[in-house]
Image (spheres, rainbow, N blue to C red):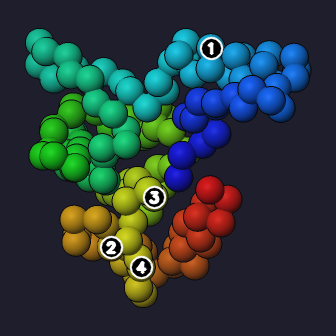
Amino acid sequence: ALSESKFCYYIIKPRLTEEMLKSALSKALLNITQKNSNLTTIKIGHNKYTINFHDVLYIESLNNSLKLYLTKGEMIVYSTLKDFSSNLPMNFLKVHKSYIVNMNHITGFKPHKFTIDNGVEIPIPTKKYINITEQYESYIRNL
């Protein structure tokens, strides 16, 4: 869902008040000057890559590295899940000791598994199932 800040307003001339004009101009200026908080840079070897968190489907921990599953491909990052997760937006949910999912890419869930856009099923531990699914449903309700 797009937030209000992503839209620019048009003004209907006959109903225009000075207050409406100020408000519309303020929102338009905010939109063009606002930083995109969904972008981050990731260092891999000697190269740095820019990724958009919107494109991350889920993250899997593999020994001393993370595998980011993106809408277009995959990426290996040398980091711990704990360190990497500290920079993630609120739409990411740790569902397992080895997995973090982007809740915007969950298409459904069944006992002990989330299904992601690409059809992959992410395990949810039995003991955490109710708590995790409640967090997801709360996120969806508050969009």
Q: Which residue is mark 3?
A: 103
Camera-side residue of 103 and 21: 21
Give the amino acid type for the residue marked by disc 1 in the picture.
Answer: Leu
Distance (Cα) linking label 2 and label 1? 39 Å
Give the amino acid type for the residue marked by disc 4 in the picture.
Answer: Phe
Question: Residue at 36% across / 78% down in the picture?
Answer: 113
Question: Residue at 16% across / 38% down in the picture?
Answer: 76
Question: Residue at 75% across / 26% down in the picture?
Answer: 13
Instruction: Rate crowding at label 2 as few (under 14), some (14 to 19) or many (20 or more) other CA atoms within 10 Å.
Output: some
- Looking at the rendered structure, the secondary structure element under dot 4 is strand
Q: Which residue is mark 2?
A: 115
Q: Are marks 1 and 4 in contact (CB under 8 Å)?
A: no
Q: Which residue is mark 4?
A: 109
Distance (Cα) linking label 2 and label 3? 10 Å
Q: Are marks 2 and 3 in contact (CB under 8 Å)?
A: no
Question: Residue at 33% across / 33% down in the picture?
Answer: 52
Is residue 3 depicted above or below 57 in this figure? above
> Is residue 127 in view from this perspective?
yes
